[in-house]
Amino acid sequence: MAALDSESPAPEPLANSVAPSGADSRYLISDLCVFLESYLPPEQISECYRAYLFGAEAHEGQKRKSGEPYIYHPLAVTRILAEMRMDHQCLIAALLHDVIEDTQIAKEQLAADFGEAVAELVDGVSKLTQIDFKTRAEAQAASLQKMLLAMTRDIRVILIKLADRLHNMRTLDSMSAEACRRISRETLEIFAPIANRLGINWVRVELEEHGFAHYWPWRRHVIQRAVQRTSGARLEMVSTVETALKRVLHQEDIQGSVEGRRKHLYGIYRKMKEKSRGFSELVDVFAFRVTVDRVDTCYRVLGLVHNLYKPVPGRFKDYIAIPKANGYQSLHTALVGPQGIQIEIQIRTEDMHRVAESGIAAHWMYKTGSQVPSSPTALAADWLQNLLEMQREAGNSVEFLEHVKVDLFPREVYVFTPKGCIISLKRGATIVDFAYAIHSDIGNSCVAARIDRRMAPLSTGLRSGQTVEIITAPGARPNPGWLNFVVTAKARVNIRGHLKKVKSREARAFGKRLLNAELSAFSINIDGVDPIRLATYLEDAHLRDLGELLDDIGLGNRLATLVARRLVGVEGDDAPSRAVSDGDAHSHRLSIRGTEGMVVHFARCCLPIPGDDITAVFSPGRGIVVHRTECRNLGSLETKGDKRLNVEWSEKPEGEFSTEIRVEVSNRRGVLAVVAGAIAEQGSNIENVQTTEKDGMITDLGFQLQVSGRAHLARIMRRLRLIQLVTRITRVTRS
């Protein structure tokens, strides 16, 4: 969020009635060198020229889709970066950014000729072309993951990639319609938000406009026509407001500039979509920027404009006192302007304006070197650290990319720690999101919280200005239910990462139990398996070690019966009979304790509880699902022994198990409370209640209860039968 509040799309000059054309000159190396003379010493310009000759030779004979020599593209990318006043290493890498990917030049050769830093930059931008992926989505995700991780080592990687994508979008017309849509979607979903996250507003706006034009051309055309129809009528209003603002500044002897702007087309479209409004319902399509010399002058101007036009309640935001996540600072206020048209005014200093437009690139353009906590460079470093954490916890590149997408669209709220530190969070964030934003360990051990000194549920959504205190406990662990309400990528990826580790441990232990239960038919256990046969099986199955095999068995991805036969060298009919006697069959059943965790699931159709006759079926990726033996949903699996598992309850099952009962009662006032009280007397927790009135006299009460087993359930039902208003009780099965 660089130049405007996330609710208010960034404006563009009124003179531009269409998106930036990006009509790109075919830059010559001589033009580039002349431009570089404005800020680089001669020896560094010579290095850039040498890199150009190297790249031109490497790309010799290659042409772009447009038919022009390929070297024009690296030159144009380098010119974009030169306009940001990037250092000579970054410019050299830009000139060579495609040689590893598209030519026979190796990274080692680049390092030898231009230095290790340049080689790392080029490698960071290059796609993964040496690996075969199952789908285009996997390939895209892996390449983007590689680039983002390279960016955490050197931020210049993403600046080169943004310049590369910007030039590609300027010249996208030469691509096929399908490619245009695919590239434009990726630009809108990934690269424009990254430019926004780094505060490089002008790059973000141009990427969005080109992406909008190619991904939704008709929608853009409709909005453009609507803007053109209203622009003529409102130009006079814009001129009136500009004149009034300049007059006020002059009267108060304030040195500053005023610029009236129209928000760019994609920003208008995004706001229409977010607020579900038509174009005619948007009231702040026009915005004005007032740029002054000092921070205190910004607040003086704010008072002047509020005196000039009536402010809209609730539409003032102070991003100077509380900068945005990318370092953007400005005062935003909405006013009712001439003719009752709502306008937006942004007030900032010259330094704030440079940061708003250039973001982290201002570090090179103006050599600010600012490392204060709110500077774009420091904030970018914090974001990159979060990316590294997400990479460690994400299961694969596709999941990592999804987390990054979530992280790239923050609509912020600002809350305080008890010590007064400001934490910026995505709008809709909860207490758990706040805990993880402070530190992963705080989130993992969070058990309760106070908002403004009052206890609040962990799922409570946060509002700007609140003070949140997190209460932790040493033995606490993330709850899977948190995934139902957290909204930030950092919280989601940490919770999932922890659950995966827990599930992996549970799967390994359960897999070992399953395999040993099957091997017991051959009078051995896993420790007694021939090591050579085990190694051969692992190699054939493309598994790293025994632990990975046990994981697969525990998660239901491999059947313990088939694995056991392979490990003992027995196939098909050579296996010993599993039905020699009732006692033998019983000895090979797997005991269900109720503490197996996330690898044993109890079917929702029949809700088995200890004491029921049970059987289990394998569910790939989940483990096993336990059913009551009479459950009709077992269907054809009853006859498929390789999909079924003989199980029984252990002698002392642990925990509570869900079941459902239906209680038919006479329709009297207070009967629900009487029945619920009787259930509570028997030590059962009611998870859910549903009432259905059959007629004026009878009501069905459906209870979902937690019980320890059939004996516990029987006690509850006997107690309910003693209630005079109860006419019938049945246990419910959904099968």
Image (cartoon, rainbow, N blue to C red):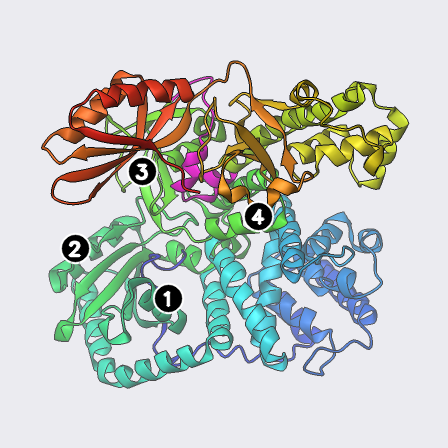
**First in sequence: mark 2 vs mark 3:** 2
Mark 3, residues whose alpha carbon is within 10 Å: few (<14), some, or many (≥20)? many
**Residue 685, above or below 211:** above
Mark 2–mark 3 Cα distance, whole angstroms, equals 26 Å
Residue type, label 1 = Arg
Question: To which residue does mark 4 refer?
Answer: 399
Assess whether residue 482 is covered by the magenta stretch: yes
Q: Secondary structure at mark 2?
A: helix
Q: Secondary structure at mark 3?
A: strand
Relative depth, front residue between 156 and 695: 695
Q: Secondary structure at mark 1?
A: helix
**First in sequence: mark 1 vs mark 4:** 1
Q: Residue at x 32, y 68 (%)?
A: 272
Report the magenta residues as a range.
Answer: 472-493
Question: In which image quadrant can residue 176 be found?
Answer: bottom right
Question: To which residue does mark 3 refer?
Answer: 415
Mark 4–mark 2 Cα distance, whole angstroms, equals 48 Å
**First in sequence: mark 3 vs mark 4:** 4
Q: Secondary structure at mark 4?
A: helix
Relative depth, front residue between 364 and 436: 436
Give how far across and how far down residue 198 sits, in percent: 49, 53
Residue furthest right in the image: 532
Mark 2, residues whose alpha carbon is within 10 Å: few (<14), some, or many (≥20)? few
Question: To which residue does mark 1 refer?
Answer: 270
Relative depth, front residue between 707 and 479: 707
**First in sequence: mark 1 vs mark 3:** 1
Q: Residue at x 71, y 82 (%)?
A: 68
Q: Which mark is residue 303?
A: 2
